[in-house]
Amino acid sequence: MKLPSLLASTSLVASLMAAAPAWAADAGPNDGSGPAIVVTATPFRHTQDETPSIPAKVDAQQIRQAGGASIADALKDVPGVSASGFAQGASRPIIRGMDSNRVRLLEDGTSISDVSDIGPDHGTPIDPLSARSIEVVRGAATLRYGSQAIGGVINTINNRVPTTLPTTPLSGELTSSYTSVNRGGEVAGLVDGKAGDLALHADAYYRRTGDYDTPLGRQDNSFFHGWGGSLGGSYFFGNGSHAGLAVTHYDAQYGIPSDTTYIDMRQTKVLSRNVIEIASPLLKSINIDGSYGDYQHQEKNPDGSVNTTFRNKEANLRGELLFNRLGAISNSALGVEYQHRDFSAVGADSSYLQPATSQNIAGYVFSEIELAKPLHLEASARVEHVSVTGTPLSDQFTSRNYTPVSAALGMLYTAAPGIKLGLTASTTGRAPALTELFARGGHDGPQTYETGDPNLKVERAKALELSLRANRGAFHFEGSLYSTWFSNYIYGELTGRTCDDDGNCVAGDANDLREVFYRQQGAHFRGLEGEARYDLIKTAHTSLTARVMGDLTRATLDDGNNVPRIAPWRLGGGLDWQSPRWDAGFSYTRYGTQNDYGLFDTATAGYNALSAHVAVRPFKQWQGVEFSLVGQNLTNDVQRYATSFNKDLVVMPGRSVRVVARIASF
C-alpha cells in the first residue's frame, strides 16, 4: 500500500470516527496556545516550567533575527545547542555534543525524512522561513519519538496542517529581507483562513544568496538558492476533533565550500494530523499523525553534470491514546509508531552506501504522576524492533535485527514559590544506523573514505540530569547539569590515513579522502548549561532585560581520547528592550578555544560573536507593519566551528547587516 493513500485514508477514517454522535458529547475545543506552551515536551500541553528537563522554544521573531537557511541557525543562542556548520544549506543542530543519529528532527511532530544523517554535506529540507516556532526537548518525553533522540528532539512547528480553527476568516503575513554579507534576498508569505469548520493554510518562500564574505576574503562555493511552500487544511467537528492533510515541497541548491561541487536537493512530503476526542471516563482522545516523504538530491559539478544521486523514501506513522486521570496517574499516553525507509544512491559515490532499508516498529507509554502537591513525576518506556538490510564492504547482502528497550523517569519538585528542582534518569538503547553498519567507500562532500561495521551492537546511554529553575521577582534562571555514560558508543574514527576513490589508502595526507572507520567503545558526555535574566525595567507594556547564558560539554572515550567534533565552551550576555513601538538589543558571546579534539583532528581557535538588532513599528494602528535592522559578527572575527568536518577549509560569514520588512494582519 502506498503511504500517501494510507495517510489520506487515515484522515478519512478519523473524520468519520470524529463525527460519530456517541463521541460528540462533552469534549470542548482547544483553548489555543500561549507562547510558553511546548507541545513537543508532553502530549498534554504543558508550559516550559512544568517538566523536569528544561525545554527551549524560539518563536518567529527570534527566527527572523537569527537569519540563515537552516534550523541550526535559528537555534544558535539556545544553551546546549550548536551547529555542524558544513555549508549554508547543510548545518544540522547538535545537542550537548550529540548530533545526527542521536538528535531526532521533526516537522510538526513527524519525521523530516531526509538523508542528513548519511553525510554532513546533506541538508535538512526545512527552511526557517516556513517555521512559526522551533522547540528543543529533552527528558522522558523524547521516548515518544524514538531512541534516535538520546540527545533530544527538535520539532519545527509551522501549522501546515492546522490544529486549531482560526478566530478570523483570513489572516496573513509577508516578510522580505536583504543581507549584505552574501548579497542575499529572501521573501516569505503565509495565509491562514477558515470557511465554516474548515481551516486552511498556505505558505511559500524564496531565498537566494551568493557566496558569502569572510574576514579572510570571499568563501568560494558558499551560495544558497531555495524555494518551497505548502498547502494544507483541517476539518473541525465542533467536539474538539479534527482531521487534516498538507502537501509540502522543498527545493534548494547550495554549494559545498570545501569543494567545487554543489547539491541540488528536493523533497515532496504529505503530512497528516488527526485528533479524535472521546467523551468517556477512561479515554481523552486518539491522536494519529503521519508523513510520507519522497526525497532526492544530486551532487553536481560546476558544469551541472551529475556525480551522484541520493534518494530516500520514508514513511512515519504514529498513533497515540491519551487517558484521563487514573488515580495518582494524572495523565498518560499509550502509543505505537511505525517507520520505514528506503535509501539508494546512483553514480560516482554510490559505492559509499549501497541500497539499504530500515524498518522500526515501536510501542511506548508516557505517564505523569502526582504523589504529592509539590512533586510532579514523568515516566516513560519504549520497546522497538528495528530491521535493517544493506551490503557492507564484504559485498554480502546483510540483514540485522535489534530490539532496543528504553526507559526514563523525571521528577520536578517545587521547593519554594518560584523555585523548582528537577531530576531525570534514563537508559536508552539505540540500534546502529545505516551508515554506521554499511558505509563502504568514498564520500566526496565531507572528503572521507568510510567503512561501517555490520557487527555493531546496540548502543546504550545511561543519563542523569539535574535542573534548577528560579523565578523570584525580577530574577529568572534556568540551568542544568548532565552526565551521560555510553556503552558501545558508535563513532567515526579518523585513522590518520588518506585514500583515493578506489580505496587505496596511505599514511599521511597524500590523497584527498580521510579514512574513517565506525567503531564502538564506552564514552562519557558531561556538561552544564544555563541562562539568567534580570528585568531592569518591567511595566505593563515595556521591559529592559539583561541576560547571561553559557554552556560547556566535555566528551571522552574510554580509551582516554576525546570524542571528535565537540563544541567548545561559550559564555555571553546582552540587553533587550521591548515596547509597543520599537524593540532593540545586543548580544555578545565568547567561544573558547577547543583543544580537546579527536584523534588526527586539529585545535579550533576561539572567537567573539557580537550581534545587535533594532525593530520599529511606525504605525500605531497597524502594529503588524515592522521594519528591522539586524547585525551579526559585528567584530568581523574569523569564526570556525569545531563541530564541522571541514573547519580547516571553511570560515563562517564575516560582518553582516540585514534589513527586514514585515507586514502581518495579526
Image (cartoon, grey):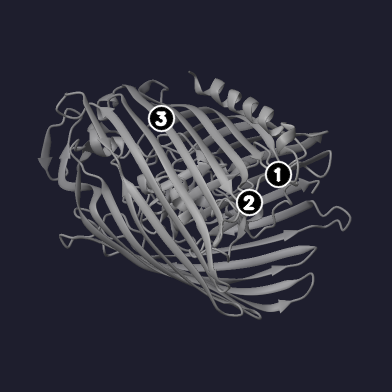
Q: Earlier in the sequence, mark 3 or mark 2?
A: 2
Q: What residue type is labelled 3?
A: His
Q: Which residue lies furthest to the left in this view?
A: 507
Q: Distance between the residues labelled 3 and 2?
A: 34 Å
Q: Name the residue under label 1.
A: 175
CB atoms of marks 2 and 1 within 8 Å = yes
- In the picture of the structure, the residue carrying the numbered disc 2 is 64
Residue visible at 82% across and 55% down? Answer: 623
Residue 184 visible in this rendered orientation of the protein: yes
Q: Which mark is residue 340?
A: 3
First of labels 2, 1 by sequence position: 2
Which label sits on residue 386? none
Mark 2 and mark 1: span between their CA atoms? 9 Å
Q: Is disc 2 placed on a helix, strand or loop?
A: helix
Dot 2 amino acid type: Arg
- On screen, residue 558 above or below 506: below
